[in-house]
Image (spheres, rainbow, N blue to C red):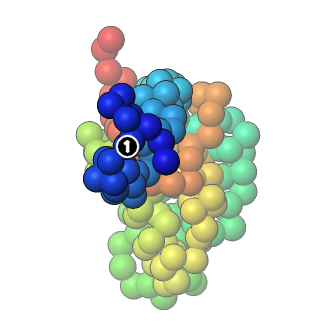
Amino acid sequence: MQRSANGIESRTERLGSVVQKRYNPRMGSRQPSDMTIPTISGLLLLSAVFCALRAQAPASVWDGAYSQAQAARGETQYKQQCAVCHGDALEGDAQTERGKQLNRVLPPVSGDVFKGNWNARPLSDLFDKVSKTMPRDDPGKISRTDSADIIAFMLKFNGFPAGKAELPPDPSLLTETLFESVKPKK
């Protein structure tokens, strides 16, 4: 038996200690505050990195939302997947057998009409349109990566500048990037 200050430890004191340890398993061990400083530091560092990455996403198509290499791949994909309906010069209403079979107006993907249709909208809207509804006679056939490449080509063709990073094949990463027909004054 352990002895307390006034002699023998009472049975109640021992029992109380057992109950406290049972319902407070960390009692007598390392304090939670010992682990919170590294944990908090790690979380702060992680959130700073995340904020820095989000801050790097272009705010506008004028900030270089795609790379030159991606646009080159997109041109190849466009010619294979899109030109039969939207035309070699992205003018719309291609007079091909496939285009005629659709029996509908095929919009241009270049020029003022195209830019007007997408102006002030997030680039994610255009991405969703291409990846989910194209080609019109086989919706969803184009992969996300190919969709991003095709949009990169369309942006290049329409005179928007290239950047260093590629357009991501994830529309959730494009919600903050605006399609702006006219270069904003900064």
State the quadrant of the C terminus.
Answer: top left
Amino acid on which disc 1 is placed: Glu
Element under disc 1: loop
Residue 11 visible, this orientation: yes
Left or right for 76, reference 132: right
Residue 28 position within the rendered picture, expressed as x and y whole percent measured from the top left: 47, 39
Q: Nearer the viewer, residue 129 or 117?
A: 129
Point 36% across, 28% down: residue: 5
Point 45% across, 71% down: residue: 132
Give the quadrant of residue 84: bottom right
Q: Identify the residue under disc 1.
A: 9
Residue 62 visible, this orientation: no
Q: Among all residues in the image, which is located at the extreme bottom?
A: 101
Above or below 33: residue 84: below
Q: Among all residues in the image, which is located at the extreme top?
A: 186
Q: Nearer the viewer, residue 17 or 84?
A: 17
Point 65% across, 44% down: residue: 71
Report the label total: 1
Above or below 110: residue 34: above
Point 63% across, 60% down: residue: 146
Residue 178 position within the rendered picture, expressed as x and y whole percent measured from the top left: 35, 38
